[in-house]
Amino acid sequence: MVLIIGKLYFARVVVFSDPNIHFSEFYISNWLTVFITGTRLMSIWVLAYHLYHYAHREITTAKENARLMVIAKEAQLSNLAAQLNPHFFFNSLNNIKFLVTENPVQARRAIDLLSDLLRNSLYGKSDKLVPAKDEISLVKDYLELEKLRFEERLQVNIIADAAMEEMFIPPLCIQTLVENAIKHGIEKRKNGGLVAIKAEKKEGYIEINVQNPGTLNNIHRAGLGLKNLEERLHLQYNGKATCSIKELPGETISATILIPTV
């Protein structure tokens, strides 16, 4: 503080040519003002220093928490995928079991189809998202397997919008709805029925709809596949994607997935 007052006194005497005041008098009349000003300035710098380090610590903590959340989400998605693939192939093998004694020729075709599915699963990319056209191709192979089993009891109609075929969607999402439609719709009806699949790109969303004959009950929601799908969609899109099932007039079940495109 003495140095600051000394500089001010020097500036007054030399620069402004005012030698009429003694240093002691100048010191007594200005020390409080200099002290308050210096204290205020120091407080500002101390506050700025602590705010900087606090903000830096908070940003570091937020980044670390975000990284941990991403790692946890990836682990959950990987775990769900590990559950779903065996579930899918077990059902396919179960279908072949029905054909072995009833129709060996069709059983061999079913084995060829399953081999292709297994090859794609084992040697294909294990991405979190796949092109919609690849998912639709997988569904067609799966439905051919089911067609060998149900024959005329199963009719299929697939409509896929060309605009969304290059869009990316979670693997096995359409297949899960189709599997549910067959298990709780076609399989439970003596005359079978139609499984209608429609995939189209709408404003801001991809809409995937699967319809099958049947009535809505708790069985539709109890299986591993649908629970798995709902959880995967929630994790993958932070709650912005939805999976819903409702009953339409005429004993028809409609399952719909909405996936944001942005």
Image (cartoon, rainbow, N blue to C red):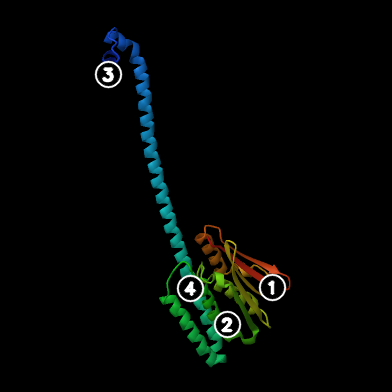
State whether residue 6 is above or below residue 120. above
Pick whichever of labels 2 and 4 is earlier in the sequence: 4
Residue 224 place in picture, x, y as percent = 55, 69
Q: Residues within 10 Å of mark 1 (few under 14, many from 20)?
A: some
- Pointer 2: what residue? 146
SS label for mark 2 = helix
**Earlier along the polypeptide chain: callout 1 or callout 4?**
4
Q: Residues within 10 Å of mark 2 (few under 14, many from 20)?
A: some
Above or below 57: residue 200: below
Which residue was labeled with disc 3? 7
- Whole-angstrom CA distance, mark 3 to mark 2, is 95 Å
Chain-order first, disc 3 or disc 1: 3
Height in image: 260 above or below 141? above
Disc 4 residue type? Asn
Q: In which quadrant of the rendered image does the N terminus lie? A: top left
Rendered image quadrant of residue 119: bottom left
| Residue ID at (69%, 73%) | 252
Q: Which mark is residue 252?
A: 1
Residue tagged by mark 4? 85
Percent position of residue 203, x then y? 60, 62
Residue flagged by tag 2: what amino acid is it?
Glu
Mark 3 vs 2, N-terminal side: 3
Residue type indicated by callout 3? Lys
Q: Which residue is painted at 55% across and 88% down in the image?
A: 99
